[in-house]
Image (tube, rainbow, N blue to C red):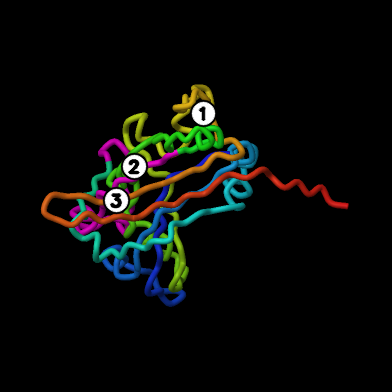
């Protein structure tokens, strides 16, 4: 079992079936953002990834934070977006001057783990990573535009997952799969335990915030959930 540190993107105004949303209008269809944990069963994911792609390894649980931060509140933290020149460049409908100038957002994101043993010892959750949404490979406007380019309609309340938010350095990785290098390098927790992946009783906590001189700090609160033992049902 693993977590994935993500943002959730709530749709406000939808679109009619058959009508694509232009990249420069996509933000007008987004109500706000939350913290999002895309729980992942890596053993199932590895088995089904070729040739099916992620399905059962992802479909069993997600956790979202209770707070939704509107895009209007995040305007001071918009940032330029640039795709590395040696990477494949987006198709024309996923590129615009507006997206290049202010498509990213500097939202700080951190992942923490509190094991059952640490909790019994009175230890604080251990921070595993910290990254910024400014490093996201796709902007929110690109995600919305791409989702609707074939005429697929969105409805108010629809929720997008941003994908794992990892920065360019190892300590900015947004999942244990990346932090432990595929399970080959265990992480040591403050109480002396080690982890390559999650164990029953582990509590995963995400936090998010924006901070910039001259502007009020914007907090996303936190999303927290504890991994419970599986309930096996083998049938009659």
Whichever of labels 3 and 2 marks the residue nearer the N terminus, that label is 2
Bin the neighbour count of mark 2 within 10 Å (Cα to Cα): few under 14, some 14-19, many 20 and up. Answer: few
- Taking the image as shown, residue 99 lies to the left or right of residue 167, namely left
Which image quarter holds the N terminus? top right
Which quadrant of the figure has residue 168?
top left
Whichever of labels 1 and 2 marks the residue nearer the N terminus, that label is 2
Q: What whole-number distance in Å separates the C-alpha atoms at marks 3 and 1?
A: 28 Å
Q: Which residues are magenta?
A: 84-112
Residue 110 falls inside the magenta stretch: yes
The residue that appears at 25% across and 55% down in the rendered structure is 103
Identify the residue position indicated by label 1 in the image.
182
Which is more foreground, mark 1 or mark 2?
A: 1
> Which one is nearer the viewer's eye here, 132 or 198?
198
Identify the residue position indicated by label 2 in the image.
88
Q: State whether residue 190 is above or below residue 139.
A: above
Identify the residue position indicated by label 3 in the image.
209
Mark 1 falls on what kind of element?
Answer: loop
The residue that appears at 55% across and 39% down in the rendered structure is 202
Which is more foreground, mark 3 or mark 1?
A: 3
Query: Do callouts 1 and 2 mark residues in contact (Cβ within 8 Å)?
Result: no
Please, which residue is most extreme toward the bottom here?
16
Please, which residue is most extreme toward the left here?
214
**Residue 144 appears at what percent x and percent y?**
38, 62
């Amino acid at each position: 079992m693993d977590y994935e540190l993500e943002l959730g993107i709530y749709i406000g105004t939808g679109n009619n079936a058959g009508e694509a949303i232009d990249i420069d209008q996509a933000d007008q269809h987004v109500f706000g953002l939350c913290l999002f944990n895309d729980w992942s069963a890596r053993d199932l994911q590895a088995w089904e990834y070729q040739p099916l792609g992620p399905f059962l390894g992802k479909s069993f649980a997600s956790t979202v934070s209770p707070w939704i931060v509107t895009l209007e509140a995040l305007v001071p933290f918009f940032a330029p977006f640039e795709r590395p020149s040696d990477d494949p460049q987006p198709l024309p409908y996923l590129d615009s001057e507006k997206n290049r100038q202010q498509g990213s957002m500097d939202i700080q994101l951190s992942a923490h783990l509190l094991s059952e043993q640490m909790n019994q010892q009175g230890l604080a959750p251990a921070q595993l990573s910290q990254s910024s949404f400014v490093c996201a490979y796709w902007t929110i406007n690109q995600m919305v535009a791409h989702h609707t380019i074939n005429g697929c309609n969105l409805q108010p309340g629809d929720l997008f997952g941003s994908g794992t938010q990892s920065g360019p350095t190892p300590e900015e990785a947004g999942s244990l799969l990346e932090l432990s290098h595929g399970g080959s390098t265990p992480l040591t927790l403050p109480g002396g335990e080690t982890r390559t992946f999650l164990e029953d009783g582990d509590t995963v906590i995400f936090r998010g915030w924006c901070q910039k001189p001259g502007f009020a700090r914007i907090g996303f609160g936190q999303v927290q959930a504890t991994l419970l033992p599986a309930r096996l049902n083998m049938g009659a």
